């Protein structure tokens, strides 16, 4: 790593809820990095001793308290807001179930440094993850589906080359100060999902770019759809109920997202997840995207 990369100030932004061991494992991997950083972590009202365990093992972490109603977007927004007060050079969004490799920060910073040298300083860098057991890709960059009937943002499998994308899933994201100054924080219109996709899309509209770093930066398992709004084994009324849930497509947040990013016919796209919930995952090849992380 060059001296120029070493001197940059970096803040890691995290949120957690009732998965103490998972959070501690994430922090353990994070502290294997050679790049110095500060951590801002929101504990959204955990009852399993997460905060005490963090304070005991990693007293340098700044733990912010939530009341259990922040969920992923709210928890990340609270931590991000605190870090933004300090005017860091970089901000790293990191899911607490993501185990990053020891060179992950170096790779992400080097990628942004390369893009800066090639006249792309206002670039978000996406770190892709894979399943620790199967090796299958899980989260990272996303592009808008080319199907006219879909409002889906599809995962882009990383390669050994830089790839530009439309937006991202927020598991491991490096945001330089220049982008944070333009885009600001996560939008409070979102609660659990859609906030990361919205942030990337807003960044693009403001003249920033989003790039997928080569290869993988760590592991993160993809959650099953079993028991969710797309599980065809559930009764229709239960699927529809879960489609409106905070962790799926609550009406207000989904309306903001579609109005903002789905064009003049946004109201047609607005119906898609609810239609899919009624039809069932196995029966309807029309999909929207949602955040699967648990809070």
Image: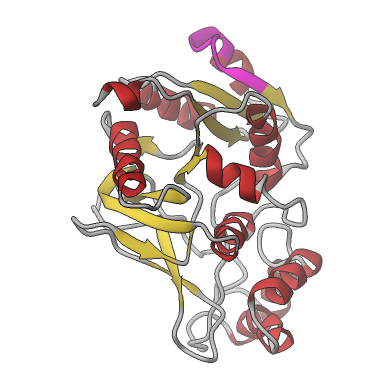
| Relative height, residue 2 to residue 187 (above, below) | above
State the image coordinates of residue 26 (x, y, percent, origin top left).
Answer: 43, 30
| Relative height, residue 261 to residue 79 (above, below) | below
Nearer to us in this view, 134 or 82: 82
Asked if residue 247 lies in the magenta stretch, the reply is: no
Q: Quadrant of the C terminus?
A: top right
Residue 196's quadrant in the figure? Answer: bottom right
Q: Residue at x 61, y 74 (%)?
A: 234
* Horizontal relation, residue 10 to residue 119: left or right: right
Q: Residue at x 71, y 43 (%)?
A: 74
| Relative height, residue 288 to residue 60 (above, below) | below
Q: Is residue 274 visible?
A: yes
Residue 274's quadrant in the figure? Answer: bottom right
* Horizontal relation, residue 41 to residue 175: left or right: right
Range of residues picked out in magenta: 55-63
State the image coordinates of residue 35 (x, y, percent, origin top left).
Answer: 35, 22
């Amino acid at each position: 790593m060059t001296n120029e990369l070493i001197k940059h100030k970096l803040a890691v932004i995290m949120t957690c809820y009732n998965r103490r061991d998972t959070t501690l494992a994430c922090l353990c991997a994070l502290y294997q990095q050679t790049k110095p950083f500060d951590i801002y972590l929101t504990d959204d009202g955990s009852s399993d001793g997460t905060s005490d365990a963090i304070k005991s093992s990693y007293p340098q972490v700044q733990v912010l308290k939530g009341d259990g109603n922040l969920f992923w977007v709210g928890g990340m927004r609270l931590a991000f807001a605190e870090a933004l007060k300090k005017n860091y050079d970089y901000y790293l969004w990191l899911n607490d179930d993501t185990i990053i490799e020891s060179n992950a920060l170096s790779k992400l910073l080097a990628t942004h440094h390369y893009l800066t040298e090639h006249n792309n300083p206002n670039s978000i860098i996406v770190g892709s993850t894979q399943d620790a057991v199967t090796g299958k890709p899980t989260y990272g960059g996303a592009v808008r589906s080319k199907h006219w009937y879909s409002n889906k943002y599809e995962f882009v499998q990383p390669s050994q080359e830089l790839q530009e994308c439309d937006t991202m899933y927020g598991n491991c994201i490096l945001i330089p100060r220049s982008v944070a100054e333009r885009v600001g924080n996560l939008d409070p219109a979102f609660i659990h999902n859609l906030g990361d996709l919205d942030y990337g899309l807003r960044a693009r509209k403001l003249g920033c770019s989003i790039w997928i770093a080569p290869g993988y930066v760590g592991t993160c398992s993809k959650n099953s759809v079993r028991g969710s709004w797309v599980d065809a084994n559930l009764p229709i009324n239960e699927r529809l109920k879960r489609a409106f849930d905070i962790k799926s497509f609550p009406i207000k947040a989904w309306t903001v997202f579609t109005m903002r990013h789905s064009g003049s016919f946004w109201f047609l796209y607005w119906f898609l997840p609810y239609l899919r919930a009624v039809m069932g995952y196995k029966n309807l090849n029309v999909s929207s995207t949602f955040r699967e992380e648990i809070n």
